[in-house]
Image (cartoon, grey):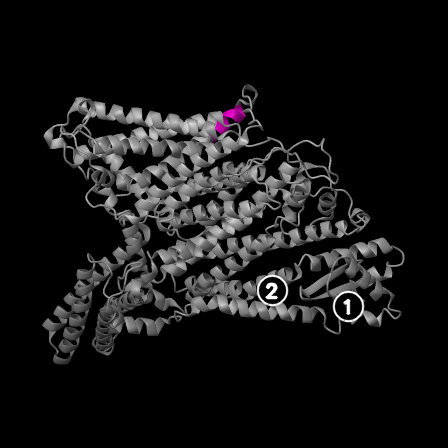
Amino acid sequence: MATDGSFRAWSDERVLPAGTTMRFVLLVVLMLASGVSLVPVAFTAAGLNEGTGCLSAAGVGTGGVPPDDVLRSAAYRACVDEHGMVSWWVGPAVPGVLVVLACGLFFVLPLWKARGNRVVSLEAVDHDGQILRHLKHLAQATGLKRMPRVVVDPSAASTGAAVFGRTGRPTVCLHGGLLARRTAAPEDFDAVLLHELAHIRNRDVTLTYATVALWRTFIAAVLVPYAVGFAILVFNSYAPETPPYEVQLPAWRALVLPVFMTVVVYLAKSDVLRSRELHADLTAARWGANPRVWGFVEPAPPTRVLPRVLRSFTELWRTHPRWDLRREALADSTPLFEVPGLLMFLTGAAVVMVNGQLWFFVGSSSHRVGQWEWNVAMALPCAVLVTGIAGTVLWRSTVHRLLNGRRRLSGAWAGLWLGIGMTVGELFGNRIAIFRWLPGEPVVLLLLALAGLTFTWWVTQCSHLWVTAWRGRTIRAPMMLTLAGACLALCAWFWWWQDYGVILANVPGLLTNVLGTGTDGLVLDPTGEHTAILTTAERAVALLSTTVAVPLALPAVAVLWLLPLLAWTVHPLSAVRRRDAALDPDKPLIPGGPLPPLRRTLSAGLFGGVACWAGIVGVKVHMHAWQPPVRLRGVAGALLYQYGMSAALLAGAATAALTASLLAGRYRLIAALAAAHTAALAGYSGVWALTASDGCLQGISTFLSTCDWRPAGTWQAFQYLLGILLILVTIEGIVAAAAISVARRAFRRSTRPAASAQAGHESPRLNLRRLAVGVLCAGAIGIPAALLSSPLPSGNSAAASDARPAKPPQFVAQEASGQAEAWYNLGGRNLLVRYDDNLGKLRALGPEAQKSPDAAALIMSRFPAICTEFGKIAKDADAYFPVPAPQIQPSWKTFTTQAAKGSEDCLTGLRQNDAALLTAGMKEINQATRAADTIKAWITATRTGLP
């Protein structure tokens, strides 16, 4: 049994990390990842990196490997030379440059603050050394190993102080007003000094000034160049000679992204600095600082609602908390252990934007896309950040609430804010709605919110479970174990989202038919009776196959329900008291007592397994009585059998999840997941046994009439569906637990809490629990391991052959529009404008000649130059990329050849005074004009024809 001393240590705010360091890491990663993406975009907006679009203008698809003939072509080399291209190493070099600049500013800031014309040494004003001796006494009392450097700012009239520099070499600056009040208010003097020494003791000086240095570097080296680049773009686009539609929607979205990102970074920076101030206040108060110094600084806030709301909003932007909040934190440190909605929102928005920036960076090199190393490199940092920040805060709040007898944390609001942050961050990104403000399938964004809710719910229940069960003197071991499992699950989620979720959200209609148009009825039913079932199932399997295409999905599913079960394998806690200053055996226990019996969850799972067996037998009886005709005993019949078995298994798992949620007074999510997967394991054993022995029981035989044992064939038949079923069983468990939780909350008065387990006879039950958990672990780990290590058999399902959705027509249209835009902006527009200008001169020549007294001389003086210009345009067009649209390329060929031939015939006719050649040349110019009109119509259609 753990002692009261160990649990008092758990509840101290110094033991469980506050997560502020992880918030700083979030800022660093966000700034660096954003710099990698935004700096090249700034060069592009300023016109210094337009050459990156030359491949698109040449017709190379997004993510496609450019052919060697394109890279070696004169048109590509001329395009890059004319428009310029930033070297490939600029993007990867941005983080290093930002770090170097931030480090330089970090070391310069203390020197600037301690410059000679602003501060003086303490010895210059402390002639008798009394202040220095007092400072050394305070530093020794607070446990500082090294006395900080002390300077004085005599021009500062405030009664405060500041510490700057770095933790290893801090500098305390005393304001002149503070020294003036030292004799009149010595307790105030000590309180201010203890607060500054607390910053040093808490080791947040380096973190604070590193945050400031990074923020200023980010503004100067990333945001300012980005703003300048887009200012140049807008100025050039809205110049008198440029049509206003040149700035397209993707450019405006790219402009909105850094604005939103700047707000997120600034709010996160302010949150880091405010949190450090509150912790310094608590440390100073623990050292004996008189709280009176915080009590007479600011009057109480007004009680009206609107001012309170405005004050709360303005508080978000402050780097130092308001004095009333600091007083409240000193009176009750509970708010420091709450889960701030702002922090969860910022975490969700920031990690999605980081993932988006990494996604763009990795996607810029086509050979990286699809490699699992790069997928992990994009997903893992985001998972670590969410787990380190949100997971740590949830653990702190859970532990503090339990040890102080407060109401249990549900995690619902925290998860909602986390999901909203991820959703908003994705909306402000530029990957799910490139050519529109909203994504093509907005409903897919609900998955982000549900992912945030599931994460916080699971972490909260696991933390409550382990705090109740753990017997060690520190809670760090189960906390790290739980957060590692949550990190694995989040890594799998971000992997799926960046690989498939982005595509599903971007393209309208892809969610309901991931196979694409023209693929209805991949497996035809010769009888025509089950076409709708087969088509619906094929689409569902194709959509869900994207989940098992992520290698981490199945291990993550196993961790979600196995990791909490390990809590039942440790010795139970029966008498854990709340945090208190004195050991009092009469103090109440932790609310909720010991863990609920595991047998309820396992019984629900076995009950669901029996339901699975019953459903499986029912399917076989139905198909035996149905006796499919010979023409339906091929692929279609096998699929109908597989889908029927899968439906029976899912129904049994759902029954188990609902039953476990109803029986569980606490830990409904954990109980539902464990029961659902227990039922799934039992149900799959029935599928495997009864299918492998098909024909042995004549009353339920389906396809065979002779008895034989076929285990390998049965495994191969259900292998591609088994991974999908495990994902669906997990979703069923989450939905069942959520539904029962909502229902019980709505009818709270009519429910009774589940009875607590009794304290006696624990050893035999503990051994049984360990045996049961061991068996479940063997099955839950063995099946995913077999699925991941075995190759997927071919031919079982047309939908399983390729989990990645093919490019749908909408995506193809977007890609074609981007190629047309690049071709037009990088040279096509200039050619067409030159042609129109020269054609205008040709058409104006006749009216001018009629008004001229010497029409022949006017025509002979201007006509050769006009004809020559048509030839130059044709030559330049022939040297440029062909139109990147197969249906328009004949018009482009007509344009170049007829313009060149018309120019040649025109000049020859003038030299030879041949009217027939002149007439032929004009006809050829007219043909080139019609071809140019077709090309311009195509350009207009690609700009306006997107949904």
Residue at the spot 50% in from the left edge and 68% down from the top edge: 96
The residue closer to the viewer here, 667 or 37, is: 667
Question: Disc 1 on helix, strand or loop?
Answer: strand
* Number of the label disc, if any, that sits on residue 151: 1
The residue closer to the viewer here, 79 or 840, is: 79
Crowd band around label 2 with a 10 angstrom C-alpha radius: few (<14), some (14–19), many (20+) = many
Question: Disc 2 on helix, strand or loop?
Answer: helix
Any magenta on residue 41? no
Residue at the spot 23% in from the left edge and 32% down from the top edge: 691
Spot occupied by residue 383 in the image (x, y as percentages of width and height): 47, 50
Question: Which residue is tagged 2?
Answer: 213
Residue 773 vs 938, above or below: the answer is: above
Quarter of the image for the N terminus: give it: top right
Spot occupied by residue 11 in the image (x, y as percentages of width and height): 66, 43
Task: Quote the CA–CA distance across marks 1 and 2.
Answer: 22 Å
Spot occupied by residue 434 in the image (x, y as percentages of width and height): 38, 52
